[in-house]
Image (cartoon, helix red, strand yellow):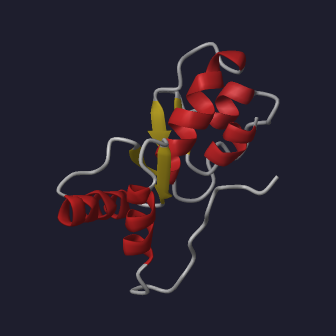
Amino acid sequence: MPSCNNAVIAAAGSGKTTRIINETADISGEATLVVTYTQNNRSEIELKYRELFGIKPSHVVVNTWFSFLLNDCIRPYQNYVFRNRVESICFVNGQSAKFVKKSDVESYFLDSSFRVYTDKISELAIL
């Protein structure tokens, strides 16, 4: 069965944002998720909706990649993996928890404040 999901990959200034906004605004009534990488891109997309339509359509959710992974892929299933709630995201440069074994699941994926490491968040979402 063909997927109805789309990935738009193109050069800067080629009209990706405008295309995404126009296509998602036309899909009225169906829940639509737009995922972008940075918070700046998220803000730009929401601003573009307001510029073109006066408001962001209620059926459209715009999320960053990390927010999508945390809120839609990790939190709904966190009780199967951890004792405590995953609080938020710990942005790291380089590698986190270098000397922690994967078998120590909580310490491998989370810091002491129960924030998931960005370098391991995709792996946790799969788990």
Q: Is residue 116 visible?
A: no
Image position, residue 87 (x, y; %): 46, 27
Q: Nearer the viewer, residue 18 or 105?
A: 18
Circle count: 0
Q: Is residue 50 left or right of residue 110?
A: left
Quadrant of the snapshot with the C terminus: top right
The relative height of residue 113 versus residue 8 in the rendered view (above or below) is: above
Residue 41 falls in image quadrant: bottom left
Residue at (62% x, 44% y) in the render: 121
Image position, residue 31 (x, y; %): 48, 41
Image position, residue 7 (x, y; %): 60, 66
Q: Is residue 118 left or right of residue 89?
A: right
Residue at (22% x, 60% y) in the render: 53
Q: Nearer the viewer, residue 2 or 93?
A: 2
Residue 3 falls in image quadrant: bottom right
Q: Is residue 46 left or right of residue 116?
A: left
Residue at (31% x, 48% y) in the render: 57
Q: Residue furthest top?
A: 83
Q: Is residue 31 left or right of residue 60?
A: right
The relative height of residue 87 versus residue 12 in the rendered view (above or below) is: above
Residue at (54% x, 82% y) in the render: 10
Q: Nearer the viewer, residue 120 or 16?
A: 16
Q: Nearer the viewer, residue 12 or 124?
A: 12
Image position, residue 114 (x, y; %): 52, 26
Q: Is residue 81 visible?
A: yes
